[in-house]
Image: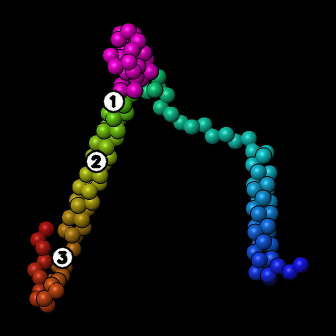
Amino acid sequence: KKATPAHERLYRSHNSNSARLEAERKKKADEEVADCTFAPKRVHNIPLERELAKQEEMERKKKGGAAKDGSSGRSVEREKAMYEAGRQRQIAARLADKSSEEAAAERDQEEAAKFSFKPTLETAEGGAEKPKKT
C-alpha cells in the first residue's frame, strides 16, 4: 500500500479542522442566543394599512366581489396607494433638499459679506482672475 502524499493529507486535515471549527462557532453562537428573550416588533403604519384594507373591501363589495378581468382588483388599488405614497415621499425629499441647498447658499453669502478681503485667483493660463461679486 502506497502512502498518501503529504499535500493531500494536509489538505484533508485542513478541511476537517475547518469544518469542526465552523461547527463549534455555530454551536457557540446558538448557545449565546438560546437564553435571549428579546424579539423585535416590526413597526408598520397599521392605521394606514387598515384604512386601505377597508377601502379595498368596500370597493370589492361595490364591484360584486371581482373585477371584470377576474382578478380581485385589490392589487391595482394597493399599487395605486403605494405609488401615491412613494410620490409624496419623493416630493417631501426634494423640498427638504431644495431648502437645505438654499439655506447653504444663503449662509455662504452671509459669510462672504463678513470679510472685506477678496483674493485674486490665478487661472490655469497664469493670468489673474477677477474676484466674483457677491
Q: Amino acid at mark 3?
A: Ser
Q: CA distance from mark 3 to mark 2?
A: 35 Å
Residue 104 image offset from top left, x and y in percent: 27, 60
- Callout 3–callout 2 Cβ contact below 8 Å: no
* Residue 71 sits above or below residue 121 on the image: above
Q: Earlier in the sequence, mark 2 or mark 1?
A: 1
Q: Residue at x 86, y 81 (%)?
A: 3
Closer mark to the observer between disc 3 and disc 2: 2
Q: Is residue 54 magenta?
A: yes
Left of 4 or right of it: where is 103?
A: left
Q: Residue at x 79, y 45 (%)?
A: 35
Q: Which residue is mark 2?
A: 94
Q: CA distance from mark 1 to mark 3?
A: 56 Å
Q: Which residue is mark 3?
A: 116
Q: CA distance from mark 2 to mark 1?
A: 21 Å
Q: Quadrant of the N terminus?
A: bottom right
Chief SS of the magenta region:
helix
* Badge 2 element: helix
Depth check: give the residue in front, 85 or 24: 24
Q: Residues within 10 Å of mark 1 (few under 14, many from 20)?
A: few
Residues drawn in magenta? 51-77
Q: Amino acid at mark 2?
A: Arg
Q: Amino acid at mark 1?
A: Lys
* Badge 3 element: loop
- Callout 2–callout 1 Cβ contact below 8 Å: no
Q: Which residue is mark 1?
A: 80
